[in-house]
């Protein structure tokens, strides 16, 4: 007897799931999200360094470097004049002038120049720097103490007059504090010229 075979059953296929669609955003929701992205991409506001610059301008008159340059301006001319005849006699004036530059301008000059060329060429420049330094810095106490030198005089023709308070205020602000802020930076520029000449002739 033939055995009847049972019909094979096909495996049941699972129904495919449709991918879930994200809910559409309304125009109002998009407009709310847009400014948030812009805020993240904006760079931080720039810092205001005006206060720092003003402080650096004011404090320059009270730094050690400023007064070292003033000392060099006062000594460079008489030392240079003295070095001219001493260099002719064979004295090591180049070493003395390099030491002066190192001590007051903070620059080490290496060389074996005798110093006659620098002492001679720097005389006009050092004389100019000396005159500017003495005159400019003397204006500070002269104008801050203006009442001491203008006592009993007529204030009507004075700068800032005709009142005593107006004349003193003008002299103190413009001639006193003005030159107190100006002279350190002017001295820095003049010292840079002196240093360049020394580096060229003493190295």
Image: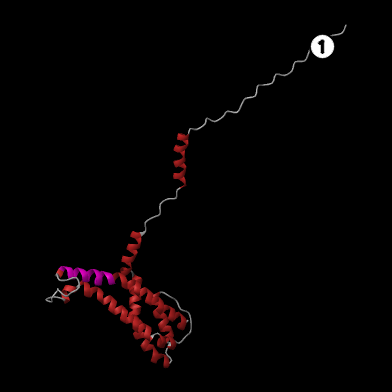
Q: Is residue 154 left or right of residue 101?
A: left
Residue sitting at the far top: 1
The residue at 40%/52% (across/down) is 45
Question: Where in the figure is residue 19, as x and y percent of width and height?
Answer: 60, 28
The residue at 31%/71% (across/down) is 182
Residue 117: within the magenta?
no
Where the N terminus falls, by quadrant?
A: top right
Q: Is residue 52 left or right of residue 112?
A: left
Considering the numbered disc 1 on the image, is that residue within a helix, a strand or a loop? loop
Q: Tell me, yes or no, if residue 104 can be seen here.
A: no
Q: Quadrant of residue 118?
A: bottom left
The residue at 69%/21% (across/down) is 13
The residue under label 1 is: 5
Residue 171: within the magenta?
yes
Question: Where in the figure is residue 197, as x and y percent of width and height?
Answer: 43, 81
The residue at 19%/73% (across/down) is 146
The residue range painted magenta reads 165-179
Name the main secondary structure of what is drawn in magenta. Answer: helix
Question: Where in the figure is residue 203, as x and y percent of width and height?
Answer: 48, 81
Residue sitting at the far left: 152
Q: Is residue 142 left or right of residue 73?
A: left
Question: Where in the figure is residue 79, as x and y percent of width and height?
Answer: 36, 85
Q: Quadrant of residue 14?
A: top right
């Amino acid at each position: 007897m033939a055995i009847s075979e049972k019909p094979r059953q096909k495996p049941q296929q699972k129904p495919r799931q449709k991918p879930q669609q994200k809910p559409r955003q309304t125009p109002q929701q998009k407009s709310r999200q847009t400014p948030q992205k812009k805020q993240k991409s904006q760079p931080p506001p720039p810092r205001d360094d005006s206060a720092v610059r003003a402080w650096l301008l004011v404090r320059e008159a009270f730094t050690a470097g400023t007064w070292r340059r003033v000392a060099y301006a006062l000594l460079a001319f008489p030392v240079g004049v003295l070095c001219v005849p001493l260099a002719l006699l064979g004295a090591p004036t180049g070493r003395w002038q390099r030491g002066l530059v190192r001590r007051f301008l903070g620059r080490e000059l290496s060389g074996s120049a005798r110093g006659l060329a620098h002492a001679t060429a720097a005389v006009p420049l050092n004389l100019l720097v000396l005159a500017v330094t003495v005159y400019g810095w003397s204006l500070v106490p002269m104008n801050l103490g203006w009442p001491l030198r203008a006592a009993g005089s007529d204030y009507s023709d004075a700068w800032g007059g005709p009142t005593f308070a107006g004349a003193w205020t003008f002299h103190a602000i413009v001639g006193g504090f003005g030159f107190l802020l100006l002279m350190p930076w002017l001295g820095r520029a003049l010292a840079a010229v002196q240093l360049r000449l020394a580096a060229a002739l003493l190295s």
